[in-house]
Amino acid sequence: MGEAAAPETIDRRRAGTAETRRGRSFGSRGFFRIVVIGLPFLWLVGLFLVPFLIVFKISLSQTAVAMPPYLPTFGDPATWWSALQQLSLDNYAWIASDELYFNAYTLSLAIAAASTVLTLAIAYPLAYGMAKAPPAWRTTLVMLVILPFWTSFLIRVYAWIAILKPEGLFNQLLMTIGVIDQPLVILNTPIAIFIGIVYSYLPFMTLPIYASLERMDHSLTEAAADLGSPPLKTFWTITFPLSLPGVVAGCFLVFIPAAGEFVIPDLLGGSRTLMIGKTVWLEFFTNRDWPVASAVAVVLVALLVVPIAIFQRQQARL
Amino acid sequence: MTSWRLTKFNVVSMVFGFAFLYLPILLLVVYSFNASRLVTVWGGFSTVWYRELWNNRGLLDAAWVTLKVGLISASVATILGTMAAIALSRYKRFSGRTLMTGMVYAPLVMPEVITGLSLLLLFVAIDLDRGFLTVTLAHISFTMCFVTVVVQSRLMSFDRSLEDAAMDLGATPTVTFFQVTLPLIWPAVAAGWMLAFTLSLDDLVIASFTTGPGATTLPMKIYSQVRLGVTPEINAVCTILIAIVSVGVVAATLLNKRRLVRQARDERLAAGG
């Protein structure tokens, strides 16, 4: 008994030293550590956290005909207290009272959710096929998925305008083969937005799913088949649950940016489909109402903060 | 997955998926060689729109601005992003680690309008004139997080005993990093740079918010023309950009593959000899 336990103890002790060594790597203090942590930390605080706090502060300010077009501005420290008292929730009350904003938020979330499901429906079979392809092909297949991502996002959205417009290539094709005799109106409708989002975000969904399918231990599905499980049942009880981490990561990578998307609804959705990203843009550039634009942005972040937090936790665990 | 019997369903879904990904781009490239001004009517092969481009000063200027912003911001973002990756993967305990993790992952999914708006309001608040500098600063900030993620994944799958050996033999952390760590994570750092560079070339929204007079980038130029309608010149610009990117990515992949093959051969020789 004592004999048998000995090697295990040694192994554990060895693992223990490896653990402490790992923790000591690069030392716990010194110049290198200060620079490597400090520089990116300060940069992120200065250009990510602080700007966001400024957005929050301006969302509580009043619109003014001035440059910058909001009050108060916190210039002189002596007037900070009175400036602080000028802050109010008026912009949020305004957003809550106007149906336009409520509709834009619900439409954005609905479009983002629907296109996430559509993207999953196309990406999953694609990733599944890639993971089952001969190993020699896989690098090429992965590269084929990534390559369009490297080409410009704007260009890829733009390419769809020529295809979807009434006299465009898609309608020409359908009319030539005689499916329709009147052109379909697709451009400037939510359908065009769905196509645009699914197309642009397809790699973000495909790659995480492929990664989790590729890692999967195939002996599990083989065992299920040997025990007489039909292929579809094997898929739903074994393959799909094991690929869930990839599916979840992919869904967040599509849903969160899609909810705030500006370019796709602007170019493909027309002026009648007002999503929230476009609302921020219009309030800022057209109405020049910076405080309301900021408040709209703050509410969008508040809506997305839960999905973003889940996404972060999942990423940090990897 | 080890077994690879492709069913009909697998093949059909892959063909459909890849056709969906590539057909729009292919059509755009084809129609950039269209002689007709009407973008959806084929009027014969022609390179007239490429020649037109050379006379379009506005587009060329914008392309030059975009290239400069991309090169500078990708390089700075790579340095900062690599540092952040080292910080997160090599120092498990420091105050503010949770905050830093959050600040690295949140920008990855943050809608661009919000990033753009918040950076612009910062530049206005500190009274920084908007232009080339502000666009570059904005691009460094939003691309560095992507570099961090790419480099961090390489640092995770990395034999740390090499770093420990160097430290045990008396190398300082700085020396260890440049002599041991950097040569080993180099491909990931290069990939991070490429990613940052393409993201910067591609960005419309953040640049629109943070730019000023004299710093119009190519996506902004393309966007303003696209809003007026699809034109063959834009098809030509897009085709050139697609060609540059495709050649770059394919070359990088092939070089990387050759390096891996050589490495594998060296390892085999070392093991055998």
Image (spheres, coloured by chain):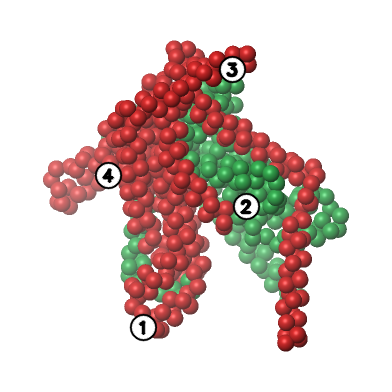
The residue wearing badge 4 is: A191
- Determine crowd level at label 1: few under 14, some 14-19, many 20+ residues with C-alpha closer than 10 A: few
Q: Colour of chain A?
A: red
Sort mark 2 into few (<14), some (14-19) or many (20+) by Cα contacts within 10 Å.
many
Asked whether the residues under the numbered discs 3 and 2 touch, taking CB atoms below 8 Å apart as contact, a structural biologist would say no
Foreground mark, 1 or 3? 3
Mark 1 to mark 3 CA distance (whole Å): 75 Å
| Residue B144 visible within the image | yes
Q: Nearer the viewer, mark 1 or mark 2?
A: 1
Identify the residue at image location x=50%, y=47%: A309
Mark carried by residue A228: 1
Q: Earlier in the sequence, mark 4 or mark 3?
A: 3
- Chain letter belonging to callout 2: B
Closer to us: mark 4 or mark 3? 3
Q: Residues within 10 Å of mark 3 (few under 14, many from 20)?
A: some
User: Marks 3 and 1: in contact by CB < 8 Å?
Assistant: no
